[in-house]
Image: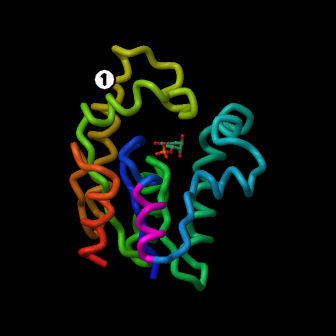
Amino acid sequence: MKVVLLGYMASGKSAVGKLLAKELNIQFVDLDDFIEKKEQLSISEIFKLKGEIYFRIKEGEYLKELLNFDKNLIISLGGGTPCYGNNMEIIKNKSKSFYLNASINTIYERLIGETSKRPLVATLGTNNLKEFIAKHLFERNQFYERSDNTILVNNKSISEVSKEIMTFI
Ligand code: S3P
């Protein structure tokens, strides 16, 4: 069984995935961490040195590698993973997927203090950030919404979100 957690940056994918994996006693993999290990570079370095297109190609390849592992896994994706190539198709075919749905305000509040590790928003000022999130989320929602389940995460703790997901597994 593969469980995939997807959603916008700062929706809680990694934190929820870690807890969920612990509670279900299943191995957890964060796709961004997996990419960093395989490429021997941080996500920011990959964007800077090799460009976003290279990152998107590798992201798709490593996603497929993980989904083809003959092993139960909880996988948390990067915010953009479902939105490129045929990634969402493959996620739908090979996993049970959960969209962690956070509002623009929730994402903004969580992202504002930690943009530096995220190349897409690292250079945006406070005003531009909210507008960027609103537009970007609008574009990406069509992919996220193809998930098997949508979990609303606003005002919920990591443990509450994890428990809610467990009722569907
Ligand atoms: C990205 C989100 C990041 C990371 C990369 C691109 C995106 O992951 O994959 O910076 O396109 O939204 P998180 O969602 O874990 O921040």
Residue 38, above or below 120: below
Q: Amino acid at mark 1?
A: Glu
Asked whether mark 1 lies closer than 8 Å to ligand 1, one says no
Quarter of the image containing the C terminus?
A: bottom left
Residue at the right extreme of this rendering: 40
The residue nearer to you, when weighing 24 against 42, is 24
- The secondary structure that most of the magenta stretch takes on is helix
Q: Position of residue 103 (x, y in %)?
A: 23, 39
- Which residue position holds label 1? 131
Q: Give the residue displayed 45% in from the left and 71% down from the top.
A: 90
Front residue (pair 54, 107):
107
Name the residue at 24% across, 65% down. Answer: 164
Q: Please provide percent x and percent y for residue 57.
A: 62, 53
Residue name at image x 24 percent, y 31 percent = 105
* Depicted 112 relative to depicted 151: above or below: above
Q: What is the x, y in percent for residue 37?
A: 72, 55
